[in-house]
């Protein structure tokens, strides 16, 4: 019995499978939402390390509205809410690049005043 020799590999089935996988990835990726609060972070040269432990998330949007763990909070209630947390827990501040600087300084001042020393200012990597 004589064996049939293959001179080339048929890549059409491989391409079909890859196109189906690409369609699946693209359709599911559109449903994934990275954050509930729209904040346009400033860019930085260095890469941001993702938090690994329990942390406190503070957001300042471009209109100066402050969110405390994704809940909108009044400025006069932030300090009392901060005191409910352990000072050893890291605090991550997400501030929109178009937000006024005084909102940013206000939050930093409250954190410093209450001795929250583990602070990370979040940026996005270029």
Image (cartoon, rainbow, N blue to C red):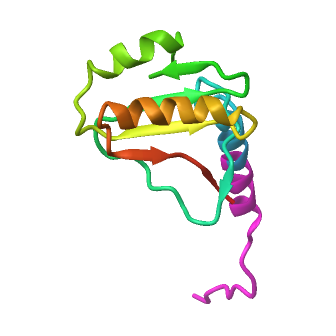
**Placement of 113 over or under 68, stated as above or below:** below
Q: Could you tell me residue 101's position as x and y percent?
A: 67, 36
Range of magenta residues = 1-21
Which of the 4 image quarters holds residue 32? top right
Q: Quadrant of residue 30?
A: top right
Q: Is residue 107 magenta?
A: no
Which quadrant, please, contains the N terminus? Answer: bottom right
Does residue 118 appear to the left or right of 10 in the view shown? Answer: left
Who is closer to the viewer here, 60 or 115?
115
Q: Position of residue 11 (x, y in %)?
A: 74, 69
Task: Judge from the rendering whether residue 52 lies leftward or rightward of residue 63; answer left or right.
Answer: left
Residue 47 visible to an observer of this rendering: yes
**Residue at 44% across / 22% down in the picture?**
69
Residue 81 sits in quarter: top left
Between residue 52 and residue 45, name the one nearer to us: 45
Task: Classify 68 as above or below 19.
Answer: above
Q: Is residue 19 left or right of residue 107?
A: right
The image shows residue 84 at horizontal and vertical percentages of 26, 18
In the rendered image, the quadrant that contains the C terminus is bottom right
Q: Choose between 117 and 8: the one closer to the eye.
A: 117
As for residue 9 lying within the magenta part, the answer is yes
Task: Name the residue rendered at 43%, 17% in the picture.
Answer: 78
Count the marks: how many?
0
Q: Is residue 34 visible?
A: no
The residue shown at (35%, 32%) is 113
């Amino acid at each position: 019995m004589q064996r049939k020799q293959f001179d080339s590999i048929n890549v059409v089935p491989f391409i079909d499978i890859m196109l189906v996988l690409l369609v699946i990835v693209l359709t599911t990726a559109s449903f994934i939402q990275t954050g509930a609060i729209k904040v346009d972070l400033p860019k930085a040269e260095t890469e941001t390390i993702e938090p690994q432990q329990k942390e406190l998330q503070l957001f300042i949007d471009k209109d100066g509205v402050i969110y405390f763990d994704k809940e909108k909070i009044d400025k006069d209630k932030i300090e009392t809410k901060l005191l409910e947390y352990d000072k050893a827990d890291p605090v991550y501040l997400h501030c929109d690049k178009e937000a006024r600087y005084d909102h940013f300084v206000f939050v930093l001042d409250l954190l410093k005043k209450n001795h929250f020393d583990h602070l990370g200012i979040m940026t996005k990597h270029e």
